[in-house]
Amino acid sequence: DAGVIQSPRHEVTEMGQEVTLRCKPISGHNSLFWYRQTMMRGLELLIYFNNNVPIDDSGMPEDRFSAKMPNASFSTLKIQPSEPRDSAVYFCASNPGHYNEQFFGPGTRLTVL
Amino acid sequence: GENVEQHPSTLSVQEGDSAVIKCTYSDSASNYFPWYKQELGKRPQLIIDIRSNVGEKKDQRIAVTLNKTAKHFSLHITETQPEDSAVYFCALLTGTASKLTFGTGTRLQVTL
């Protein structure tokens, strides 16, 4: 298995632009998580899905952020419009169920100028 | 939501010495406690975990202990090596929710 796949790996954009991050979870995993990591705030959970359904989006910082999971093998995190303070590494993770290891993807390093 | 405190934030040890990282939590319903290691520029990866019905678990040079009464759990690394240098995160799962709450991380530096 290729593990959790994220794209792009690096994204540099200008303030005000729309950014879309993509994630393909490990096949058979029914939970998917989006995290943001910065030096200041550490590792923050933004949103997670169970069986493609959003369960908890309390970590989504504001309305500029949205996430979708149209099917079991694909999820997107969108920022519109982007701001410099959104610069961070965004990780996607999946796991096969409760009490199981979360497998993280390689992350997307986002820089908003 | 659940809160977890992790100490110390940085730790420097000499190669061969032991390292201990401690996390405390508040919700007695917490029942799963994994530890993740993140090397510089890499993704977090699980290194060991423990469930609430177990007090200690060991895997080669790493071990985790859980004290449910005192609501704390610790990571122990013995005979540290330079490749142990990384950021370590504790985490916990509470109740039936699937989401993990992560600690703030400990930057471990193993010096020669």
Image: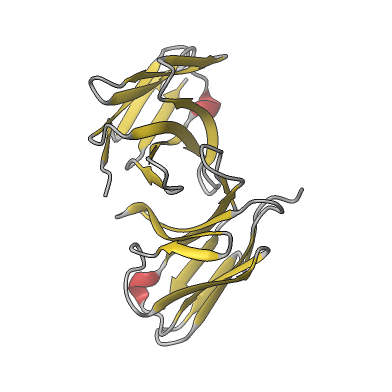
Q: Quadrant of the C terminus of chain A?
A: bottom left
Q: Residue at x 56, y 38 (%)?
A: A100
Rendered residue at 42%/20% (across/down): B53
Location of residue A99 in the rendering, given as x and y in whole percent from the top left corner: 51, 37
Q: Is A33 displayed left or right of B24 in the figure?
A: right
* Image quadrant assignment for residue B9: top left
Q: Residue furthest right?
A: A1
Q: Looking at this view, is A59 or A91 the one in front?
A: A59
Above or below: residue A5 compared with residue B86 = below
Tally of marks: 0
Colour setting: secondary structure
Q: Position of residue A72 (x, y in %)?
A: 66, 63
**Residue A11: x, y in percent?**
55, 72
Locate residue A70: give its quadrant: bottom right
Residue A74 x/y as whole percent: 65, 67
- Name the residue located 55 percent from the left edge and 28 percent from the top edge: B83
Residue located at (61% from left, 54% from top):
A30
Q: Is residue B63 above or below residue B21?
A: above
Seen from the viewer's position, the closer of residues A8 and B4 is B4
Determine whether A92 is above or below B31 in the image.
Answer: below
Can see residue B21? no
Can residue B81 be seen in this snapshot?
yes
